[in-house]
Image (tube, rainbow, N blue to C red):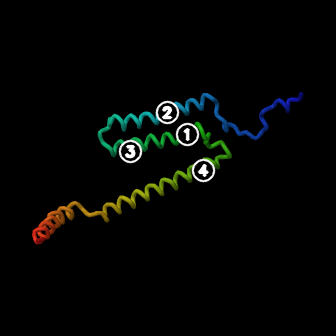
Amino acid sequence: MSDAVHSHDHGHHEEGAHGSFGSYMIGFGLSAILTAIPFWLVMSGALNDPQLTGVVIMGFAAVQVVVHMIYFLHMNTRVEGGWSFMAMMLTVVLVVIVLSGSLWVMYHLNANMMPHAQMEMDMGPTQEMRAMHNMSEMP
C-alpha cells in the first residue's frame, strides 16, 4: 500500500487547530476551578458584600470565557491568518458596548423615574390620614 493511503493528514489542518488530550484536560480543570470558586464565594458569603461578590464573579466569568476560547475553541492569532481572532475581538467590543450601554440606561431610568425616598416619606402619612378620615366618615 502506498503512503497516501496510510496518511491521515490530508493537508487541510492548520497548525494549532486541534488540541491534545492534555490541553483539553487543562481546560477542563481550569473551567472547574473557575466555576467552583464563585460558587464557594456565594454559598459561604465570604466577601460579605453582594456588589463586590458580583464584580468578582463577573471577573471569573470573563477569565472562564477566555479559557474556553483558548482550550476548547482553539482561538489564537495563527488560525485562519488571524481573521477569527479579529472577528472575536470585534464581537467582544460590541458586547461590551451593548452591555455597558444597557446597564447605563437601566441605572439612569431607575435613578430618574422611580419615586425618591423623600417623596415616599412625604406621601406616606398623608395617604394614611386620608384613609383613616374616609373610614371615620363611613356609617
Q: Check whether the beta carbons of the residues at disc 3 and disc 1 lie within 8 A of each other.
A: no
**Residue 90 position in % (x across, y down):** 56, 53
Q: For the residues carrying marks 4 and 2, which lies nearer the camera in this image?
A: 2
In the rendered view of the protein, which quadrant contains the N terminus? top right
Mark 4 = which residue?
86
Determine which quarter of the picture holds residue 54: top left
* Quarter-of-image position of residue 74: top right
Residue topped by disc 3: 55
Up-down relation of residue 138 to residue 104 (above or below): below
Question: Badges 1 and 4: C-beta atoms under 8 Å apart?
Answer: no
Inter-mark Cα distance, 3 to 1: 20 Å
Q: Secondary structure at mark 3?
A: helix
Give the amino acid type for the residue marked by disc 2 in the picture: Ala
Of 132 and 100, nearer the camera is: 132
Q: CA distance from mark 4 to mark 2?
A: 28 Å
x and y percent of residue 18 in the render? Answer: 66, 36
Give the alpha-carbon distance from disc 4 to disc 3, as whole Å.
27 Å
Q: Would residue 14 be found to the left or right of residue 51 on screen?
A: right
Q: Tell me the kind of residue under disc 3.
A: Val
Q: Secondary structure at mark 1?
A: helix
Q: Amino acid at mark 1?
A: His
Which one is nearer the viewer's eye here, 27 or 137?
137
Real-space Cα distance between discs 2 and 3? 19 Å
Label located before the other in sequence (4 or 2): 2
Q: Is residue 23 left or right of residue 98?
A: right
Q: Quadrant of the C terminus?
A: bottom left
Dot 2 corresponds to which residue? 32
Q: Amino acid at mark 4?
A: Met
The answer to whether residue 88 is left or right of residue 122 is: right
User: Mark 4 touching mark 2, by CB under 8 A?
Assistant: no
